[in-house]
Image: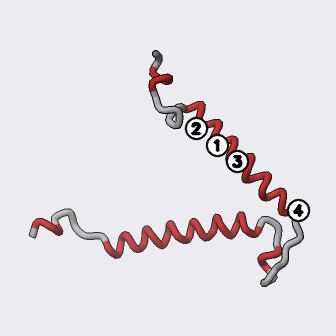
Amino acid sequence: MTENESKHWLLRPRTIRLLWIGFTVVLALLVLADMFIHPHTLFGVDGTFGFYAWYGLLTCAAMVLFAKALGLLLKRPDTYYDD
């Protein structure tokens, strides 16, 4: 058995590369499908092309930044429980 075969299938570099390619293709197809769907918008901006893709990306980035800031605010020293 080689080293690559002994790893879990999700840890193999080939599987990881194939998953990246597969998910990228699916995401691209979902964004392209937006050209064929008539949006029923509530606001002006939600009718733009690829709105849900870029809105999700920006929202995810904002949540990560908020979590990092919250972590800095709530961080305690390593010796907090030693006292």
Q: Distance between the residues labelled 4 and 2?
A: 30 Å
Q: Measuring 89% from the left and 70% from the top, which residue is drawn there?
A: 38
Q: Nearer the viewer, residue 61 or 7?
A: 7
Q: Position of residue 32 (x, y in %)?
A: 83, 56
Q: Which of marks 3 and 4 is nearer the N terminus?
A: 3
Report the coloring of the rendering: secondary structure
Amino acid bearing label 3: Thr
Q: Distance between the residues labelled 3 and 4?
A: 18 Å
Task: Count neighbours of disc 1 (C-alpha within 10 A) and say few if under 14, some if 14 to 19, many if 20 or more.
Answer: few
Q: What element carries label 4?
A: helix
Q: Which of marks 1 and 4 is nearer the N terminus?
A: 1
Q: Tell me where residue 30 sits by quadrant.
A: bottom right
Q: Distance between the residues labelled 1 and 4?
A: 24 Å
Q: Tell me where residue 78 sits by quadrant.
A: bottom left
Q: How far apart are marks 1 and 2 (CA)?
A: 6 Å
Amino acid bearing label 2: Ile
Which label sits on residue 78?
A: none
Q: Which of marks 2 and 3 is nearer the N terminus?
A: 2
Which label sits on residue 20?
A: 1
- Using residue 29 as the reference point, say whether residue 3 is left or right of it: left
Which residue has dot 4 on it? 35
Which residue has dot 3 on it? 24
Do the CB atoms of the residues marked 1 and 2 lie less than 8 Å apart? yes
- Using residue 46 as the reference point, say whether residue 67 is left or right of it: left
- Using residue 29 as the reference point, say whether residue 54 is left or right of it: left
Which label sits on residue 16?
A: 2
Amino acid bearing label 4: Met
Q: Where is residue 57 in the image (x, y as percent from the top left)?
A: 64, 64
